[in-house]
Every structure is written in structure tokens, then in C-alpha cells.
Image (cartoon, rainbow, N blue to C red):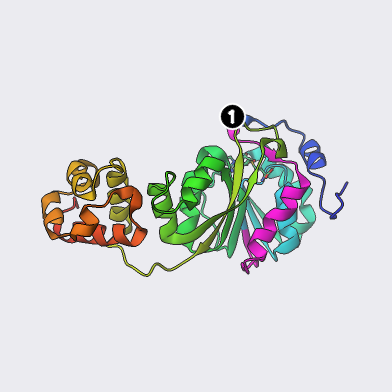
């Protein structure tokens, strides 16, 4: 059974999978054809290279089917063994001709293939960890998240939503929310609204001293987002691991020190983190 666009009917896919969704395993399946049909377009309209698309969390395969229509090759990672087996059977032809590879495993643990783009309706419970596994690959991503998470990821400095998540995501890519998706588009329906985010990789026009230290520094200063950076750097040395935060404050620019974390741009954090790394005696 297919829809008007020739894609496989999502409800029929759920039936053929022969298994009820388990919401404790983050199984909320997209069943709205219009949303399913639009998602791959967010990648293609931005010129993403779809020669090898990675999908995390294939479930019954409605999005997998749409991805196979735009990609030369798809790899899908699915943790649930029953859904992974279903994907192999439902798309046996594509598996046989090498266009689809099904990997049964946890997207946080399995070795990910070299991919040119990832398009996924992520499991809510692990969406942040999975996104930050994908972002450093420097490829275009189209990912579905909970709306609040998506908005924080895409937020600009000075807005309420702006935080560590916005800076870390913005360090790797330009981030935009391209669509919000209501609970009714899923079966079973989640309690929250979702949103599709598109990330376009970018090479920052600044450097950071060390990725891990940069992330620790951000985590630390955003625990005191309403304090001036002068106080935030001093008060959070136990989190950032700085042995001598006063040396950082003595060396830094007054303009950056008197600003609050919620208003600084990623390059400002990079400037301060570089200084902290050089003179603040970070833990080895
Ligand atoms: C929100 S559903 C999306 C399913 C399908 N792509 C869709 O759009 O209807 C998330 C899927 O991810 C799977 N999943 C959950 N945690 C996972 C993990 N850590 N690694 C890989 N797959 C996971 C679930 O079994 C489920 O099939």
C-alpha cells in the first residue's frame, strides 16, 4: 500500500512491523505523510550531498522509505532488534542491491559509517548525546527533536533560550528550526511538540584551545549565566578545573568580563576559554 506520492503508507509499515511501539524505548512513529514527505527536502533544498545518508532510529521505516527516494545509499541504525529485523525484511530489495544497510545497535555505541548527511527523527531520550555525536562530523543534518530543545539549540545571544547548548551547537554549525511538528503527527502521540532542525556545518572563524576544555569552560560559566563573566569565571573554577581563575580575570578584556554569559557570542567564549587555558592553570 502506498500514499499519493508513491511512498509506503506509514500505518501499513507499523502493522507489518508486527510490534506495538514502546514509548519507554522512545518509540513515537511519524505517521503524517505531509511531514514525512517534507523532511528529506530540508536537506536537498540546502544542497546537502545525499550520496550516503545516515538515519538514526528507523523504527517501522516510514522515513527510511523517503530517504531511499532521495539518497544513493542509506545506513539506518536501530537499537530495537525487532524493528531492525523488520527494516531488513521490509526493504530486502534495497538491502540486497547495497542501497540500504541496517545496523542493529545503540547509536551512542556503534561505529558510525562515513556519511554525507544525516536525516533522522531522533529518540527523545538520547537526542542530545546523538546530536553531539553527529555534529563534529561536519556534515549537514536534519534532525527532529523536542521543540524546546530545538529552540535552545538555534537560539541567538541575548535571548532567553540562549545557553550552553546554543554555543556548542553554534560552534559546529549554523542551526535553524525549519518546522514544528504537533503530537498528532505521531503514533503513539508524545506529550510534547517536536521540531525539525537543520544544521549547516561551518568552520568557525576562531579557534578554541582544546575542544574538551572549551566544553567544560562553557558548562561552568553557564551555571552562572546571570553573573558577570568576571564573577562566573571566579565562582565556577571547581567546575571548569581552573587552578588560577584570578589570572584569567587579570588578563581578560574588561568588555568581556563585564558581560553576562547569556549575551556573549561563541567567538567571545573562545577568546576567554583560550586565555583560561593559557594562564588559568587548567587541570591536566
Ligand atoms: C522517534 S522513533 C522514530 C522512528 C522512525 N524513524 C519514525 O520517524 O517514525 C525513534 C526510534 O529510535 C529507536 N532508538 C531509541 N533509542 C535508540 C538508540 N540509542 N540508538 C538507535 N536507535 C534508537 C527506537 O527504537 C525508535 O525506533
Q: Is residue 107 above or below residue 134?
A: above
224 on left or right of 8:
left
Residue 33 visible in the displayed image: yes
Q: Is residue 234 above or below residue 204?
A: above
> Is 15 in front, or is 275?
275
- Ligand 1, by image quadrant, is top right
SS assignment at label 1 = helix
Q: Position of residue 59 (x, y in %)?
A: 68, 42
Q: Is residue 9 magenta?
A: no
Q: Is residue 25 magenta?
A: yes
Q: Which residues are magenta?
A: 24-53
Question: Which residue is the site of mark 1?
Answer: 24
Q: Position of residue 26 (x, y in %)?
A: 60, 35
169 on left or right of 273:
right
User: Which residue appears at 73% of the width and 50% of the height?
Assistant: 36
User: Which residue appears at 66% of the width and 46% of the height?
Assistant: 58
Q: Position of residue 275 (x, y in %)?
A: 20, 60
User: Which residue appears at 65% of the width and 67% of the height?
Assistant: 51
Q: How many marks?
A: 1
274 on left or right of 247:
right
Residue 78 visible in the displayed image: no
> Is 157 in front, or is 245?
157
Amino acid at each position: 500500500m502506498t500514499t499519493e506520492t508513491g511512498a509506503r503508507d506509514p500505518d501499513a509499515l507499523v502493522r507489518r512491523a508486527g510490534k506495538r511501539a514502546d514509548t519507554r524505548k522512545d518509540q513515537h512513529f511519524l505517521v503524517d505523510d505531509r511531514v514525512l514527505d517534507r523532511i528529506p527536502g530540508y536537506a536537498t533544498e540546502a544542497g546537502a550531498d545525499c550520496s550516503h545518508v545516515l538515519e538514526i532510529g528507523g523504527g517501522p521505516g516510514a522515513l527510511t522509505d523517503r530517504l531511499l527516494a532521495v539518497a544513493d545509499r542509506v545506513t539506518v541504525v536501530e537499537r530495537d532488534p525487532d524493528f531492525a529485523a523488520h527494516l531488513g525484511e521490509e526493504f530486502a530489495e534495497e538491502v540486497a542491491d547495497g542501497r540500504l544497510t541496517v545496523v542493529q545497535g545503540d547509536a551512542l555505541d556503534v561505529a558510525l559509517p562515513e556519511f554525507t548527511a544525516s536525516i533522522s527523527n531522533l529518540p527523545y531520550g538520547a537526542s542530545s548525546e546523538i546530536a553531539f555525536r553527529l555534529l563534529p562530523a561536519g556534515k549537514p543534518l536534519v534532525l527532529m527533536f523536542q521543540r524546546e530543545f530545538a529552540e535552545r539549540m538555534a537560539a541567538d545571544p541575548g535571548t532567553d533560550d540562549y545557553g550552553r547548548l546554543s554555543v556548542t551547537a553554534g560552534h559546529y554549525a549554523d542551526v535553524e528550526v525549519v518546522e514544528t511538528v504537533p503530537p498528532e503527527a505521531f503514533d503513539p502521540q508524545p506529550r510534547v511538540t517536536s521540531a525539525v532542525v537543520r544544521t549547516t556545518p561551518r568552520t568557525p572563524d576562531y579557534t578554541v584551545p582544546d575542544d574538551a576544555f572549551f566544553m567544560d569552560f562553557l558548562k561552568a560559566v553557564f551555571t552562572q549565566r546571570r553573573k558577570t563573566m568576571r564573577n562566573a569565571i571566579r565562582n565556577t573554577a571547581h567546575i571548569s578545573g581552573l587552578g588560577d581563575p584570578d589570572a584569567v580575570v587579570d588578563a581578560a578584556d574588561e568588555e568581556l568580563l563585564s558581560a553576562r554569559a547569556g549575551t556573549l557570542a561563541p567567538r567571545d567564549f573562545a577568546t576567554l576559554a583560550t586565555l583560561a587555558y593559557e594562564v588559568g592553570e587548567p587541570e591536566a
